[in-house]
Image (tube, grey):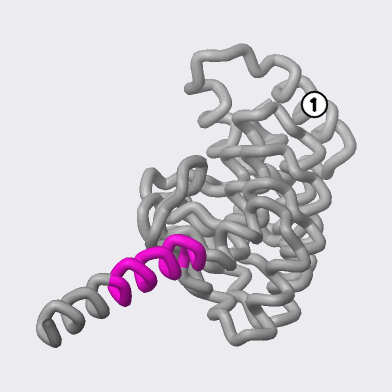
Amino acid sequence: MKKKSVYYCLTVLIFAFSVLLTQCGLPANDELVVAAREGRMHKVQELLAAGANVNHRLEQVPAGHTAQDQPIIAAATSGQTEIVKLLLEKGANVNAQNTEDYENALHRAIKNNHDETIDVLLKAGIDPNLETINGIDPLLLAVEQDNFPLIQKLVKYGAYPDTTRISTDINAAHFQMGVIKYARSLNRSYSGYLQQTQNYCLQKVKTDLTCKRF
């Protein structure tokens, strides 16, 4: 009888423990990444106050999320600008890259057209030249979107217009032929972008390395 009671108690404890795990959901660090992307500011604040790792990489991946994202990348993906600011204040690595495809917060913000988030990241000093595993940097994403104002902004914050990275001493204000070659190589019409570049060149000195091509 005593043996049966022990087995019964163990069964009850195991069941209770499984229920507790279900109720708790994701580990705190993973929950921080999920909450950041979903815009749950109060939850993000609560988890950070409890000691969650601001630079944790997502391990348990719920539907709609990407493995190995860090909180700042997750927040930038959905344009949670205030959460991005908070994470930066708490020590988030602004240049954190996803270990799966090497995308970072700036890549995600550009891909999803989150202008305010882009501005916050650039002002926080994010490196605008970090490339994905496929060699795509933020400037090339801007070209792909025909977003000339963003191209100008990225160059202002240090993006290399020369996408071949041959030159290390180019003036940050100059557009190089590499960007235009990339635009022309895509299966879309970039006449608007090229025209804007030509208009830009009309206002530049003749020594501009891009303008000399026109």
**Residue 27 shown left or right of residue 1 in the figure:** right
**Residue 106 shown left or right of residue 45 in the figure:** left
Residue 93 is inside the magenta segment: no
**In this picture, is 73 found above or below 93?**
above
**In this picture, is 18 found above or below 182?**
below
Instruction: Identify which residue is drawn at 41% across, 64% down.
Output: 19
Nearest to the observer: residue 174 or residue 61: 61
Q: Which residue is mark 1?
A: 196
Q: Is residue 26 visible?
A: yes
Nearest to the observer: residue 158 or residue 124: 124
Quadrant, the C terminus: top right
Judged from this view, the residue extending furthest toward the right is 203
Instruction: Identify which residue is drawn at 57% across, 26% down.
Output: 183
The x and y percentages for residue 41 are 76, 63
The secondary structure that dominates the magenta segment is: helix
Magenta segment, which residues?
A: 12-26
The x and y percentages for residue 15 are 32, 67
**In this picture, is 86 found above or below 22?**
below
The x and y percentages for residue 20 are 44, 69
Instruction: Identify which residue is drawn at 12% across, 82% down.
Output: 1
Label 1 amino acid? Answer: Gln
